[in-house]
Every structure is written in C-alpha cells, then in structure tokens.
Amino acid sequence: MKKFEPRPGFVVQAFRFALDPNVTQEQRLRSHCGAARAAYNWAVSWVMASWWQRKAEASYGIGEEEQTPWRPWSLLVLRKVFNEVKKTDPRFAGWWEENSK
C-alpha cells in the first residue's frame, strides 16, 4: 500500500476531540446514530428487493427484458424515495422528525 505524502508546500495536521456528553446529549447522539443506521438499512433493503425479485423471475424462465426493472441506487434517487417513504412508513413516522438533519 502506498504511503500518503502531502504535496510539496502543504502541511498535514490532525486533531482528535473527545466527546463528553451529558445524559440528554448522549440520548440524542444515540438517537441520531440509530436514525442513520435505519435509513441505511432501508436503502439497502429497497435496492436488494429488486435484485431478489429479478433473481426469482430469472429462475422462472422470464426473459431479461420482461423482468422487473432495476431500482437505481444513486444518492439523488435514494434521497427522493426515502423522503416519501419516511412520511408514510410506520417504522419512521414516530421518531424521524426528531432526527432529521
């Protein structure tokens, strides 16, 4: 593996900060981390659903052009679809507003 070397004339500096949240802040941090994980898990399952559907259709002998279309997984598409889903899906409706951005 190649070692990182800064460009000539540049200085690389790093900082490390320790978090020391109080009880309320820790609960909020945990809630935000959980929300990020829930959104990630939703995105993976949404994309994989079309993959599994296409795999099943192929096993039934359905041709490539007749199979369920692939779901796109670009950031823009996932964000747009998730913004609609989070308003209606009961998994997100109760607590997502507290964690949004």
Image (cartoon, rainbow, N blue to C red):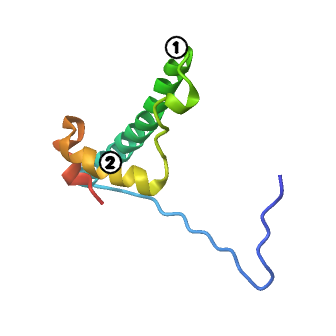
Query: Which of 57 and 51 lies nearest the eye of the viewer?
Result: 57
Few, some or many residues within 10 Å of mark 2 (<14, 14–19, 20+): some
Could you say whether the residue bearing mark 1 is in a helix, strand or loop?
Answer: loop
**Amino acid at circle 1:** Tyr
Please give the name of the residue rendered at 28% of the width and 46% of the height, measured from the top-left corner: 31
Which residue is most to the top?
60
Q: Is residue 1 left or right of residue 57?
A: right
> How many discs appear?
2
Is 4 placed above or below 80 here? below
Which residue is most to the left?
94
Q: Is residue 16 left or right of residue 45?
A: right
Please give the name of the residue rendered at 81% of the width and 82% of the height, measured from the top-left corner: 8
Instruction: Identify the residue under disc 2.
Output: 82
Q: Nearer the viewer, mark 2 or mark 1?
A: 1
Q: Is residue 47 left or right of residue 89?
A: right
Few, some or many residues within 10 Å of mark 1 (<14, 14–19, 20+): few
Q: Is residue 32 visible?
A: no
Please give the name of the residue rendered at 36% of the width and 44% of the height, measured from the top-left corner: 39
Could you say whether the residue bearing mark 2 is in a helix, strand or loop?
Answer: helix
Q: Please tell me which of labels 2 and 1 falls first in the chain.
A: 1
Which part of the image, by quadrant, shows the C terminus? bottom left
Compute the Cα span from label 2 to label 1.
31 Å
**Amino acid at circle 2:** Phe
Instruction: Identify the residue under disc 1.
Output: 60
